[in-house]
Image (cartoon, helix red, strand yellow):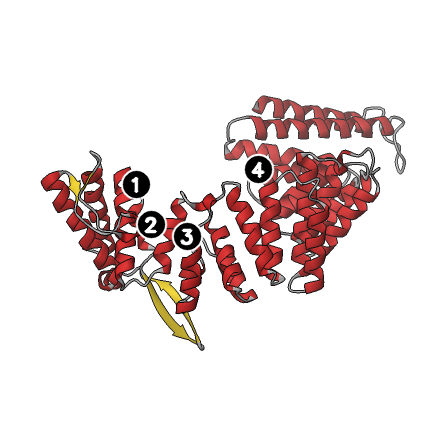
Amino acid sequence: MKGLIVNAMASSRVVEADGRGEGGQEEGGRGPHQEGTHDGHAVSLESAAALCLFFLVYCEPARSAQRSDAREIPRKNLRSSHVCWHVYGLLHRSCQDYSEAIKAYKQALRIDPENLQILRDLGLLQVQMRDLAGFRETRLAILTLRPNSKVHWLTYALAVHVGGDPAGAVDVIDSYTDTLDEDTAPEFQRNFESSELVMYKNRAMGEAAGDDEAGLRGALENLDRIEPVAVDRTGWLLARVDYQLRLRMYDEAAGSCLMLFERGITEDHRIHGAYMCALLRSDAETVAAVSRMKGTGTLATLAPLDDGQRTTLLGAYERPPACLARSPAVRRIVLTLLDPSGPAFRAALDGYARRQLGRGVPSLGSDLSSLYLDEVRGDGTSRYVLATDPADVRAHGVHRLLAGLVDSYVSSLEGGGSFPRGSGGGEGGEEEEEEEAGPGALLWSWYLRAVLHEQAGE
């Protein structure tokens, strides 16, 4: 491959020599074959540049000497060849020198400002380097050159959006749809691509609205209008819940959450968090905080609840609708609603742990560690923080209670192959008889005990 580059360099020199030809160039003037010679010289340089690109892209990583040869060829005659500037930028990009690559692309566009390939390469590097303003300008230039392409319209809308102007992105999408025939264009028919477009536009409308009630109502009304086109029913309902909570339409938001549960989405704690906010009629700040929570976090693990709030949520989750009757998430959420110092919590924790150990769930220890919550007060408010320090974990009441339960499981399983008599697994909290355990229950009980020792730094 190095030989190809050497041959390309040699051919470039031959054309240069021919340009100075034996026929000579008249002093102070141009030779008789100068124009053709210049064209041949440009073709030679561009061919050599293409060979350099092939060498760098398709071959094994080059040694430093070979890279030096590859750099030298496009460096010649850079002032007049956009191809050489382009390849020079590709060379910098291959060496991860992205700033210099962007400079080279811009020099190439100075010579050939309507070259789509160079514009695309420049846009990719700009968004990679988080030059969002430059990315927006580049995509606008591409759209100006090819206004009939849907891809260029939507990419420009995205560039405007990521640049911090969601309202501008909505305007770009509207400008694009205004060019279409509503009766025949596929963008107005029910299909996946159209669904994604209208849902994206609606999301941008919601971001542009912020806390403005009129803007949020406009986004909600738009969501109702696009319902016949939206294929993603789950995404549509999630957006509806978000707008309804932000507009303090709590009864409607609770109904939308139940519709999501009826669709089988019962294990997503984000929806349960929104459902709790709707039941307790939480303020906008609390709703926003709950929406940012991860994992099994809900309103009940964000901040302490008063007795009335606990009663309201327990009424909804201890007697759930039919669509939630068999949901593991409901049993897990009940643990966060009960007082950790009371007998009801011990019974619920006992039943939950037995069920998971019988099924052989390896992540049970990590799951239950999210119950190690400590209340922290400050600025007139109180919040829960998760205890992670081994000393804090050892002193936490839930950890001590869980360790005692697991020790009783191990003792009973080793002696008789069954879980001990308890009050955790029966319906309504009634006293249980000893129940037979699966063959792996003892193994997973030992594993859970080891995890608890590790959490406590023992």
State the residue position of label 3: 319
Assess disc 2: are there few (<14), some (14-19) or many (≥20) residues with their C-alpha within 10 Å of its C-alpha. few
Q: For the view shown, which residue lies furthest in the bottom direction? A: 380
Q: Earlier in the sequence, mark 2 or mark 1?
A: 1
Label 4, secondary structure: give it.
helix
Cα distance in 3D space between marks 3 and 4: 62 Å
Disc assigned to residue 94: 4
State the residue position of label 1: 361
Disc assigned to residue 367: 2
Residue 33 in the image: state x and y as whole percent. 87, 26
Q: Earlier in the sequence, mark 2 or mark 3?
A: 3
The quadrant of the rendering that contains the C terminus is bottom left
For residue 120, side relative to residue 453 (left or right): right
Residue 253 in the image: state x and y as whole percent. 58, 55
For residue 174, side relative to residue 208 (left or right): right
Res. 135 visible in picture: no
Assess disc 4: are there few (<14), some (14-19) or many (≥20) residues with their C-alpha within 10 Å of its C-alpha. some
Q: Nearer the viewer, mark 2 or mark 3?
A: 3
Say which amino acid is labelled 1. Answer: Val
Label 3, secondary structure: give it.
loop
Q: Earlier in the sequence, mark 3 or mark 4?
A: 4
Res. 197 visible in picture: yes
Say which amino acid is labelled 3. Answer: Arg
Assess disc 3: are there few (<14), some (14-19) or many (≥20) residues with their C-alpha within 10 Å of its C-alpha. few
Cα distance in 3D space between marks 4 and 2: 45 Å
